[in-house]
Image: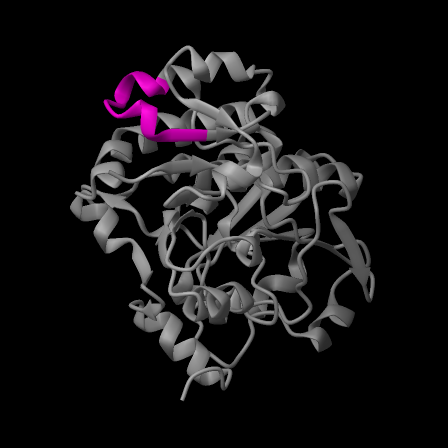
Amino acid sequence: MKTLGFLISHKPDEKRRALLPRDLLNVVNEEQIYVEKGYGKSLRIEDFDYENFNAKVADREEVLRCDCLVDVKLGDGDFLDEIEDGKMLIGWAHALQKTDFTTKCMEAKHTVLAWENIVQDGRYIFYRNRELAGEAGVLQAFTYLGKMPYECRVAILGNGQTARGAMRILHGLGATVDVYPRKLEGLFRKKMYEYDVLVNCIMWDTSREDHIIYRDDLKKFRPGTMIIDISCDPGMEIETARPTTISDPVYEIDGVIHYEVDNTPAMFPYTVSEILSYNFSTYLDGIIIGEMAEELEKAVVIKDGIILDQSIIDYRKKLGLLV
């Protein structure tokens, strides 16, 4: 059987956790689970709460020796140089965008189970986290705009789960909202200067070379226009996008406010941790005994250092990182 270690993410402002003590009731082989000391502190959970359910609490160094490691923000993990080769790494990997992370995983022959790819019965297992991304981003961003939503005309790009969350908050607070799904990108380009706020929730096709909003477009917006970029894909759909943090979320270019936080759900760690733990805990025994569910097998994007996801292969070739 494999050991499974849960690490505290070192990404700034990240307080979400992948496992709550009560959900260890879903696990048969709980003695194979290690949690880093202080793992639940951000949620006011004590170490003994995990120990009461037979999980082991250990120093970070001991947890890093586990066969499988779970880090909520895996793609931003800072521990890859501290572990042996051939681990299974689990969490939000974003292995396409996080090119340095992917390179290190290839070199060390790690296997990467990407949370963002887990689909159960046709639906993303953590879909509520995507909705929360839209909800949380809109809530925080408007505090930097200086206007209430009911004073604003808002355009949402995309019509998926993240857009649904943004829409829920905007409608609830009285904003006038238009939604532009992918097939209406051309119309959005014509209309975008009419809005006070633009909310980007698009899942971008990384094979594309163009942008939806270019640097030259910014000078045509009214001063004080805000882009709430929930997708936050640097250099992709919005040419001027660069990641920011929850504690320092905005910057301004040519009078246009950019909100570019790439982990907005982390502002609601209790809500998200319950979602993560409840859903993921049911899979832990399969990982421990080496009999993963089919949906987990399909979510493996790198296996023993070999990239399995064709979109990652294509993007790395585009960047000259693969031949």
Examine the rendered structure and indicate whether residue 67 appears above or below residue 182.
Answer: above
Does the image show residue 298? yes
Q: Residue at x 42, y 69 (%)?
A: 106
Nearest the viewer among 42 and 212 is 42
Among the 4 quarters of the image, the one containing residue 67? top left
Which residues are the magenta region?
A: 23-34
Nearest the viewer among 121 and 319 is 319
Q: Residue at x 65, y 74 (%)?
A: 214
For the N terminus, the quadrant is: top left
Residue 273 place in picture, x, y as percent: 47, 28
Nearest the viewer among 193 and 52 is 52
The color scheme shown is one colour
Nearest the viewer among 42 and 79 is 79
Does the image show residue 167? no
For the C terminus, the quadrant is: bottom left
Q: Residue at x 60, y 52 (%)?
A: 78
Residue 288 place in picture, x, y as percent: 26, 37
Q: Indicate yes or no whether the magenta region holds residue 150.
A: no
Residue 220 place in picture, x, y as percent: 75, 70
Q: Judge left or right: residue 161 versus residue 168.
A: left
Examine the rendered structure and indicate whether residue 139 appears above or below residue 294.
Answer: above
Residue 170 place in picture, x, y as percent: 57, 36
